[in-house]
Amino acid sequence: MAFTRATGKHRARSRRTRRGMSAVGAATLTATGVISALAAPAHAAEPDTRAVGRTGLAQALTVGDSLADAIDAQAEAQHHAAARARAKAAARRAAEARAKEIRAEKQRAARAAERRRLSTFRLPVAGSYITTGYRTGGSLWSSGSHSGVDFRAASGTPVLAVGAGTVVEAGWGGSYGNNIVLRMADGTYTQYGHLSSIAVSVGGTVVSGQRIGHSGASGNATGPHLHFEARTGPEYGSDMDPVAYLRAHGVNV
């Protein structure tokens, strides 16, 4: 009697079927491994510090931090040095500006003092006084009256310019003897007569208080003294009150 293979679940699997099952099992294992890995993320993410140490990464990080700190410190020092340099430069500029301002102030003060000196009037004979007044009458004067004032002065006493001016006459003046006429800075004129000597020349300039000659008794004079006139012009006959003239210029007469 012949035997036949039973059908249904008792049939043996074919080779092709076994290979498929093997593939399915491998896939299942792979999936199981992936799932297991996903199920424990903390364990998977935990760093292996021993491995980091073995690679020298920690040392590299430490050296890098130290270098960065050194660079930062150097930059900070350079910043402070630059700030100090700017402050010193600013202080130097301020000091130079102040020194320039002080020099300018001194120059202005010197110019102001010079202007005051030039514009200051004084007596033609220091410390002297008037012995014969303006418009005094008498036969001593051809016009019948005194056209100026006489200051007491021994022969050889220095005669001074009463203010700044220019010499327009210096020499013999007839009855005035040796005389000097100055055109003053304000446009008026002053005259100095009966001199024993003359120390200036025509065209020269004088300043207030400068010695222009010495007193004497030359010309029409009864004794040594200084004849002083104030005039509106350089010529005789343009005289004005010399006392009022000097007082108007701040001189105590």
Image (cartoon, rainbow, N blue to C red):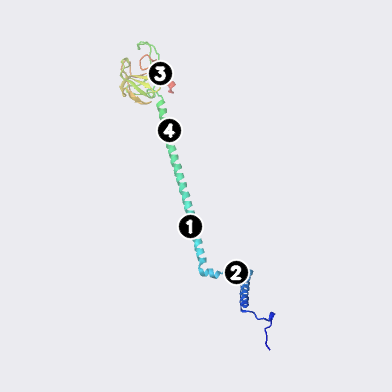
Closer to the chain start, of discs 2 and 3, is: 2
- Quarter of the image where the N terminus is located: bottom right
Asked whether disc 3 touches disc 4, contact meaning CB atoms under 8 Å apart, the reply is no
Residue type, label 3: Pro
* Residue for point 50% across, 62% down: 64
Q: Nearer the viewer, residue 60 or 202?
A: 60
Residue 68 at least partly seen: yes
Mark toward the viewer: 4 or 1:
1
Q: CA distance from mark 2 to mark 1?
A: 38 Å
Residue 230: x and y in percent read: 39, 18
Comes first in the chain, label 2 or label 4: 2
Give the mark toward the camera: 3 or 1: 1
Q: Position of residue 133 (x, y in %)?
A: 40, 16
In this rendering, the label closer to the viewer, 2 or 1: 2
Mark 3 or 1, nearer chain start: 1
Q: Distance between the Cα atoms at labels 3 and 4?
A: 33 Å
User: Which SS class for mark 1?
Assistant: helix
The image's mark for residue 44 is 2
Q: Amino acid at mark 4?
A: Arg
Foreground pick, 201 / 122: 201
Q: Nearer the viewer, residue 89 or 142?
A: 89
Judged by depth in the image, the label closer to the viewer, 2 or 3, is 2
Q: Which mark is residue 108?
A: 4
The amino acid marked with disc number 2 is: Ala
- x then y, percent, for residue 136: 39, 13
Q: Name the mark nearer the viewer: 2 or 4.
A: 2
235 left or right, relative to 82: left
Task: From the viewer's side, name the closer residue of 209 and 253.
Answer: 209
Q: Pointers 2 and 4 in contact (CB under 8 A)? A: no
| Sequence order check, earlier mark of 3 and 4 | 4
